Amino acid sequence: MMALEWTSLFNPNPTVSTIDLFDGQICVVLDDVLNEPDRLVAWASSRGPFTPPSYPYPGLVADIPHPLLAAASNHFDRMLRDRLGYRRQTESLVRLSLMQQAASALRPIQWLCHRDRIAADPSRTGFAASVLYLFHDPALGGTDFYRPKQSPAETDQLIADSQRLDATSFSKRYGLTGGYMAPDNPYFEHIARVPAAWNRLIAYDGGVFHSAAVDSSTPLHADPTRGRLTLNGFYTCTRPLRS
C-alpha cells in the first residue's frame, strides 16, 4: 500500500452507535470504518513477521508506519475524542495485534480481564483505547466489559497475584482454571459484550476492565488473513476544563 493511500484509509462517514456501560462510561461502535479493509489485511499479511510483545498479550504484534499512525490519530480526533468526553489528544500508539496463543498455554494474568492504563489524576487525564476487527469470522470474538465485584484493594491483590503466582498456586488460591476469561468469572461482573464484525471499530476508556470475548475452544490462527487480527489504538487525552 502506497503511503499516499493511508490518508484516505478511514471512511469519513461510518455508522455510529453507543453502548452504555456503567458509571457514565460508554463504548462507541463504528461500523464500515475503513474504505478498503481487505487491502489493509493484505498489507498486514505481507509486511513481515509479527513478534511476541514484552507485555502479557496472548499473541503477536507488529508496528505500523507513521502515515498509518497519523491517519488513525486523525480519525480518533474526528470521530471519537468528543464522543468519549475528552478535550485534546496528546499522544497516540497504534499497532497490529494477532491473538493466537492456545488457551492451555495462558498464564494466570491472561485468564483475567485487564485495564490498559490508569491515570494518576483521572479528572485531568484519560486513556482511550480502540479495537478495529479485521477478521470475518465472528466466532473469533468481540470484546467483553467488566466491573469488579470486590473492593479496589482486593482487585489489585488479585491482579498482582496473577502476575507473580504460577498457574497451580493461583488456581488453588482463587478457584480459577486456565483459559480465556468467561463472563461468569466470580471476581468481575460482566457488563456488556460487543460482538466482533468485519470492519467494526470500538472505542472506550482504557481504564475500564475488558477482555477479548474468545471462547477457549476456538482455534486461533497465526495467519493474519485467517486469524483474530486487530488494529489497536491507545490515546492519551486531556479532560475538559472544569469551570
Image: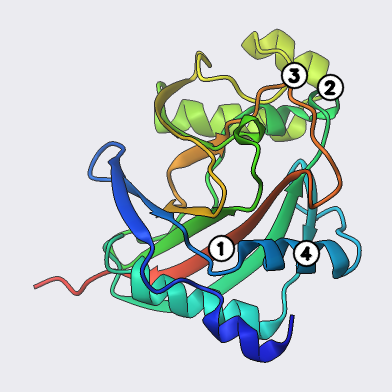
In the image, farthest residue toward the bottom: 4
Give the numbered dot on residue 104. 2
Tell me the residue that label 4 is attached to: 42
Task: Name the residue: 74% across, 24% down.
Answer: 218
Amino acid type shown at disc 1: Gly
Q: Is residue 117 visible?
A: no
Q: CA distance from mark 1 to mark 2?
A: 28 Å
Quadrant where the C terminus sits is bottom left
At numbered mark 2, what does the secondary structure look like: helix, strand or loop?
A: helix
Tell me the residue that label 3 is attached to: 217
Disc 3, disc 2: CB below 8 Å? no
Amino acid type shown at disc 4: Ala
Disc nearest the viewer among 1 and 4: 4
Q: Quadrant of residue 103?
A: top right
Disc 1, disc 4: CB below 8 Å? no
Amino acid type shown at disc 3: Ser
Task: Name the residue: 42% across, 24% down.
Answer: 190
Categorize mark 1 by other alpha carbons within 10 Å: few (<14), some (14-19), many (20+).
many
In percent of width and height, residue 39 lies at: 70, 68
Q: Nearer the viewer, residue 143 or 88?
A: 143
Disc nearest the viewer among 2 and 4: 4
In percent of width and height, residue 57 lies at: 73, 45
Disc nearest the viewer among 3 and 4: 4
Q: How is the image coloured?
A: rainbow
Dot 1 or dot 4: first in sequence order is: 4
